[in-house]
Structures are given as structure tokens and as C-alpha cells.
Amino acid sequence: MKIELKLKALAVAAIMAAGTPAFAAIDGGPSGNGELLLNVRYYGGDSATTGGDDISGLFDLGFKMDDMIAANGQAGYTKSWDLKTGDYGASWSQLTSFVGASNLGKMEFNVIALDDTDRNLKGGSRYLTTGNVDAFPSQGNANVKTMNGMDKYVDANNSRGTHGTVANGASVATATDPSDTFFGAINGFGQGDTWLQKTTVDTTQAVGTDQNFWFLTTSSTSNLAQATKTPFGFDLNHDGTIGAGEFTKVSLSEAGVLTITSPVPEAETWAMLLAGLGMLSMIVRRRTGV
């Protein structure tokens, strides 16, 4: 009887364990479909220092790179996160309390996603990044491949904050915390500085600023060839390109709301489109005799 009860207890425990979700760490570059990561940083002085007055936060947005790619080109697409609530709340509160209400406007942010499955294949390195430019500068394949250094930053933070205990966690680090956990440029070194150097674009902007979204990927196996650069947005004027006013925008408010939004066509654009569809329908009816 005792053995039977023990076996039943073990069976129940196994069922309960199987039904409990296992929270994984951040999906970074090696996963092949990295999660969108929001990085927020603040320098306590006028420039980067080695002191304890600098801080950064890493927020796992729980939205994969391929999800964002699939959403590209959709007019009026929008997605937002409130960092003050839920599993982000404690880290956002810690971050903003450290910075102070009067300095929130001095915080900087960017959003990135990593994929570094095989740097020796065409398309084996893919990266999403914000960028405060309407035309991304030239990027060599070799330049894109070396962005995998950001995996060190992801790995260093996976054991911090709530990344290992909730589905989409957050963490905070100061410049004096363990190596690679701080997203900044301390005396010219740091993961934030590394990302900036690899993209050759200012990918971090002050909160309240709109940034454009860019997709970078290796175009071939040659390190000397130019990488493929794709802007995210909606082609409002139907000229086959994404230009000023057509980009998917990424913004973070001082109140802790992150928003990704693609442009919406003007009313007259919709009217012209509907009129065109009406004309096409009329032509088809005449030809088919309907």
C-alpha cells in the first residue's frame, strides 16, 4: 500500500511539473530568431564615466524577430508595451528611481533583435536595430557578422533580474556591475558602444524621440560584399521605396510606454485606391459580360 501511494504521489508530481511552464532565458543570436530587446541607459555625468552614477536596463519584449519581419509593410500596424506594469514594473521603477524624475529626459534607448545562426552563410547573420537615419550608411558583410558580440551582453544578463523566472523579464545594471551587463560606453568600452561601432549609426536616442527601424543581413558569404539593408515601413506613395514619412517608428516615453507604429495612408490615398479597385472591377465585368 505504501509503495502504491508513493508511486501515485510521484505520478502526480510528474504531471504537475509537466504542466508548469518552463521559463527560458532571452532568445538571443544563436536561437536563429532572437527576441526584441529594449535597452535603456543613462549617464549620470555629461559623459561616460567609470563611476556608479550610470545605469542601464534590459527589457525582453517577448516578440520575436520573425514576428516583426512579418508585420513589416502593414499600414497602421502598432504594438506597445507599458514598462511600469507587470513583470517589467520592478526594473522600470528601479531604473527611473536611480535616474530621478528631473533627469528622465536624459535617458536613451534603442530596440534590437539578434540572429547569428551561421555567419558563413548568406543570410546567416540578421539584425534588427533602430537607427536615427533615413538612409542607412554602407555596411559590409564583415561588419554585420561582428554584431554577434552583442550575445555577450544578452548572456551576461540572462541570470540577472527576472529573465530566468518569468516569460518576458527585465534587468538593471550599473557601470560597476559585472562585465558586459551594462549597456553603455565606459571609457570607450561597453556593449552599447560596441553596437554603435558595428552599425556605424547612432542607434540610441533620447526618450521621446522617434527612431526608424532597420533590418540588416549578410548578402553573401563574401566579407567584402555589401550587406543588405531593409527599412521597415509602408510605401505610402507606391514608388517601391521607403523614405521620409514612411518608416516604422519606435518611440519610448518618459512615462515608460514603448510604441512601434507604421504609417497610415491619408484619406485621399485610400479614396484613390478604392477608386482604382472600382475601375478594375468595372473593366473585369465588361470583359466577362457580367
Image (tube, rainbow, N blue to C red):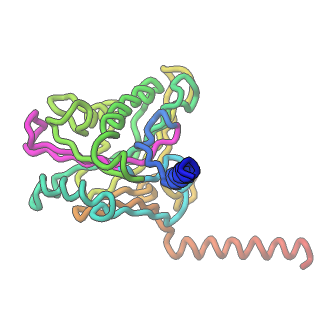
Residue closest to the far bottom: 290
- Residue at 73 percent across and 74 percent down: it is 279
Residue 288 horizontal side relative to residue 183, left or right: right
Work out whether residue 133 can be spotted.
no
Q: Residue at x 10, y 35 (%)?
A: 49
Would residue 58 be counted in the magenta stretch? yes
Seen at 9% across and 45% down, the residue is: 44
* Residue toward you, 267 or 176: 176
Q: Nearer the viewer, residue 79 or 214?
A: 79
Above or below, 184 against 57 in this view is: above
Q: Does residue 113 belong to the magenta stretch?
A: no
The answer to whether any part of residue 153 appears in the image is yes
Lateral position of residue 66 relative to residue 60, left or right: right
Total number of numbered labels? 0
Q: Position of residue 92 (x, y in %)?
A: 24, 57
Q: Quadrant of the C terminus?
A: bottom right
Residue 261 vs residue 274: left or right?
left
Q: Is residue 230 above or below residue 248?
A: above
Identify whether 12 is placed above or below 119.
below
Single out the residue that lies furthest toward the right: 289
Image coordinates for residue 247, horizontal then vertical, percent: 44, 55
Residue drawn where x is 50% and y is 43% of the image: 230
| Residue 285, horizontal then vertical, whole percent | 85, 76
Q: Which residues are magenta?
A: 32-59
Q: Quadrant of residue 272?
A: bottom right
